[in-house]
Image: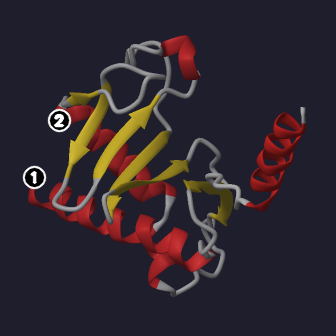
Amino acid sequence: MRRHSLRRLILIALTFSMPIAQAVTVDMRLRIRQTGPGEPRNTSPRETTITRENLIKIQQFIIKQGKRETYCSMYGDNPAHKTKNYRFYLNPDSGQMNMNCDLKKSGFYNLTIRKADGGKNQYRTVEFLDKHYVYIASTWPTSDLTVQKIRQVVVDAMKEILIDIKKK
């Protein structure tokens, strides 16, 4: 009896003394206001890169070049493009109602950018359906995300694909 009680006490003590290993995921969503005609334009390079106009160019380019790739279990055969450092995927606006990514069933104003960083995939989702705002969402298992880091990945990726577009 004492032996069982002693084992239980040791087990309980070990359980409470061991650090808990949990994966922490940080979700962030940024909103970038789009300037309209006649409004002063911010001269920051970030602001001139992350625009709805550039995103529509990228969207049309990816759809026109016709390459498809599945990157997640939610969709199949996403319109996709690969550059040297990034992969780009268009997602349907209607979500899983268009899980086969049929171009005739919905718009594709949702761009996912994937970057491999230290053996881990880093994703940014850029939504540009709203004419007044572009939204950047980030899910990354770290606590050191800053607004600057989230935006910089999108700026660098967009610059890289815009260069591909100019070449073709």
Which residue in the protein does label 2 denote?
A: 65
Q: Residue furthest bottom?
A: 43
In the depicted view, which residue is nearer to us: 102 or 17? 17
Q: Identify the image quadrant of residue 38.
A: bottom right
In the image, what residue occupies the spot 22% across and 33% down? 64
Q: Is residue 57 left or right of residue 36?
A: left
Q: Residue at x 65, y 45 (%)?
A: 130
Mark 1 sits on what residue? 168
Numbered circle sitting on residue 77: none
What is the x, y in percent for residue 114? Answer: 36, 51
Give the Cα distance between marks 2 and 1.
10 Å
For the point 60% across and 75% down, which residue is it? 144
* Foreground pick, 50 / 41: 50
Q: Position of residue 141 (x, y in %)?
A: 56, 58
**Position above or below: 42 against 94:** below
- The x, y position of residue 4, in whole percent, is 83, 34
The crowd level at tag 1 (other Cα within 10 Å; few <14, some 14-19, many 20+) is: few
What number of labels is visible?
Answer: 2
The relative height of residue 72 versus residue 89 in the rendered view (above or below) is above
Q: Which sits earlier in the primary sequence, circle 2 or circle 1?
A: 2
Q: Label 2 is placed on what type of residue?
A: Gln
Q: How is the image coloured?
A: secondary structure
Which residue appears at 70% of the width and 56% of the height?
20
Residue 16 falls left or right of residue 1: left
Q: Contact (CB < 8 A) between labels 2 and 1? A: yes
Q: Nearer the viewer, residue 141 or 78?
A: 141
Q: Secondary structure at mark 1?
A: loop
Q: Quadrant of the N terminus?
A: top right
Picture layout, residue 89 above or below residue 48: above
What residue type is disc 1 on? Answer: Lys
